[in-house]
Amino acid sequence: MRWLAFALLLATPAAASEDLVSGLSQDTIEIRSNYNGTDIVVFGAIERPVSEARPDIVVVVRGPETDIRVRRKDRAMGVWINKNRVILHGMPGYYFAAGNRPIAQTANAATLSQYGLGLAALKPRAVTGRHALKPFLDALIRTETRNRLYVEAPDGVEFLSGTLFRVRVPLPSSAPRGHYVAEVYLLRGGRVIDTRASDLVIDQTGLERRIFDFSQGEPLAYGLSVVLTAMAMGWLSSLAFRRA
Amino acid sequence: MEIYLPIAEMSVHWLLLLGLGGGIGFLSGLLGVGGGFLLTPLLIFTGIPSSVAVATTSSHVTASSMSGALAQWRKGAIDLKMAALMTAGGLAGTVAGVWLFAILRRSGQMDVVVSAAYVILLGTIGSLMLRESLSTLRAARSGTMPPRRVERTWIHALPFKMRFPASRLYISAIPPLGIGFLVGMLSAVLGVGGGFVVVPAMIYVLRMPANIVMGTSLAQIIVTTAAATVLQSVSNHAVDAMLALWLIAGGVVGAQLGVRAAARLRGEHLRLLLAVLVIFVAIRLFYGLVATPRELFSVTMGSGS
């Protein structure tokens, strides 16, 4: 409960208006050989609340931006083939949004869209393709939700007291490596009062890192060593079975 | 325990990888096919990106073919001259295939052509083998074994005749080169090793003795898939060494068990088994082509085509 002590320490009053403090349970995640995804905790506190009524808290975690290709199958000559393709540029490789109630109820659509709060507010930076975006974007969100890479948790924000809250963020092992940002939004009456952001880095380490670097830096030597290892293992197995 | 795969960038349970590798390795040793056409879709099914699945499968096939081929080598059941000739044709075919691949992709009809070619090829080969092995089995049961036909076909009319002592054949060099070329082209376009084409071609077109076919096919597959592994590493960075290691560990043991099992079975039984397997894959692919998919959209992250 180290983070709790930390949050309480930060929650000591100073100036006038209502604002936020927040932090992460860890700021780096190291991928090792037994890595199978992990949970991080975003925690925070509301300072100098202006009223007894509890404000809304929305927490958003975004992974590194990437280009995503979405293809649609169509029937041609009796068979289903990929005919239409749209590339969505600048989509997050991971996206998590949580509120203390359904995010759509915390503010109007324009505000949610402006700050990118909730899956419904996700938009690409640019689009390549001649088709209407909507069905392709919906399909992408549907697919990534199934892969647990896009998550919306309507009651993911857990209040521990009137002002102290935390959110558990599940990161599957397939969440891309790179730079993540965790943002906390404080809303009252549908307006954003304050925001806080923290950085998170997911990266490979140890043997996994060395394999990855080797495959990128020396692809020919890498390929040859995989082939030689494969042949050596084939040879060893036939030796072992001849003895047996 | 889950194992993190650094190139695929995800985790898979190690028992699943050992089991998949072992099962496909067993089939490889039993039937003399690489098994890539089965392993690649299974890996994709576990969630591994298709480029990584295709590229890493080739290293698994190298290992299990090596394992199986060495076992056959000790029994003197490899025609190295034939394997070398087919490999030479195969390398030329691969170059032609890469060129054809680019043309098809530019025309935008890649998917249809590849899938249709697959279904037709597998369906034809599978049904021919099924018919032949069943009629052989029926003949054996009724006790009227037909004499081995040594009829003169178009193969014997071709020039550049060579002696293949291990296969006890005296035939033109053109058919082995041509089959190698065709298979090399197929493997570049379809991304498979081609064992399921080579084995029937050796049996029915070249009429090689059944006991030589498997080892010779495996020897040729080692070279093709080793080249494919290196090419995939260099051009796509898609070979996952960690994934390869676990698949291979299962695969080489499976291959040895497969070779032992093959020694207990009759040739026509093995051909029947391969025929059923090939037809099964053809039906599965055909179903995928014509059935209405549950999800019309497919999503690919990051760069690629």
Image: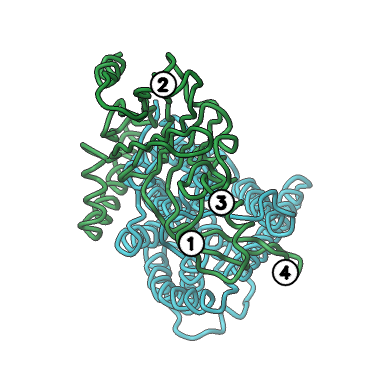
Tag in front: 4 or 2 = 2
Residue A172 visible? The answer is: no
| Disc nearest the viewer among 2 and 1 | 2
Q: Are marks 1 and 4 on the same chain?
A: no
| Circle nearer the viewer, 1 or 4 | 4
* Gap in angstroms between the C-alphas marked 1 and 4: 24 Å
Q: Local crowd at mark 4 within 10 Å, few (<14), some, or many (≥20)?
A: few
Quickly name the residue at label 2.
A165
Which is more N-terminal, label 2 or label 4? Answer: 4
Q: Are marks 3 and 2 on the same chain?
A: yes
Q: Residues within 10 Å of mark 1 (few under 14, many from 20)?
A: some
Rendered image: mark on residue B201: none
- For residue A76, the mark is 4
Say whether residue B242 is visible: yes
Chain shown green: that is A
Provide the residue designation for mark 1: B191
**Amino acid at the residue labelled 1:** Gly
Type of the residue with mark 3: Leu
- Where is mark 3, residue-wise? A140
Q: Do labels 3 and 2 touch, CB within 8 Å? A: no
Q: Position of residue A109 (x, y in %)?
A: 58, 46
Q: Look at the numbered disc 1 and give the secondary structure of its residue.
A: loop
